[in-house]
Amino acid sequence: MKTQSEAINEGFNVDLSGPGRPMGARGKYPHFEVIPLLTDMEAELLNTLGLIRKLLTEGTPTPDAQEGVVLAIDGLLSVARA
């Protein structure tokens, strides 16, 4: 799935209204493409998990790398609690 920013960059119109998953659409009826999009929370979670994975696979992390991951997790938690 694409993030909302990726979809916009690829020419999709993004619809955030209504309940449920955000959707992206491009083209005109009857020939249009509709795709599901990641929510901002899902995109942030994937980004944070990627940082954690990179940190764990590179061996002993530097203090800067540790701080970056902690800040990413804190940001994710603050969005989740908002």
Image (cartoon, rainbow, N blue to C red):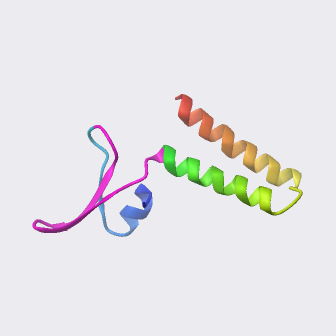
Question: Vertical placement of 22 versus 25: above or below?
Answer: above
Magenta part of the chain: 19-40
> What x and y, as percent, mark residue 24?
30, 58
Q: Nearer the viewer, residue 49 or 77?
A: 49
Q: Nearer the viewer, residue 46 or 16?
A: 46
The N terminus sits in image quarter: bottom left
> What x and y, as percent, mark residue 50?
65, 57
- Residue 35 lies in the magenta-colored region: yes
**Residue furthest to the left:** 30
Q: Nearer the viewer, residue 34 or 26?
A: 34
Question: Vertical placement of 29 versus 19: above or below?
Answer: below
**Residue at x 75% of width, y 50% of height:** 68
Q: Is residue 42 left or right of residue 27?
A: right
Q: Quadrant of residue 11?
A: bottom left
**Residue at x 38% of width, y 63% of height:** 7
Report the number of discs: 0
> What x and y, as percent, mark residue 36?
34, 55
**Residue furthest to the top:** 81
**Residue at x 74% of width, y 43% of height:** 70
Q: Nearer the viewer, residue 72 or 21?
A: 21
**Residue at x 81% of width, y 49% of height:** 66
Q: Is residue 4 left or right of residue 33?
A: right
Q: Quadrant of residue 71?
A: top right
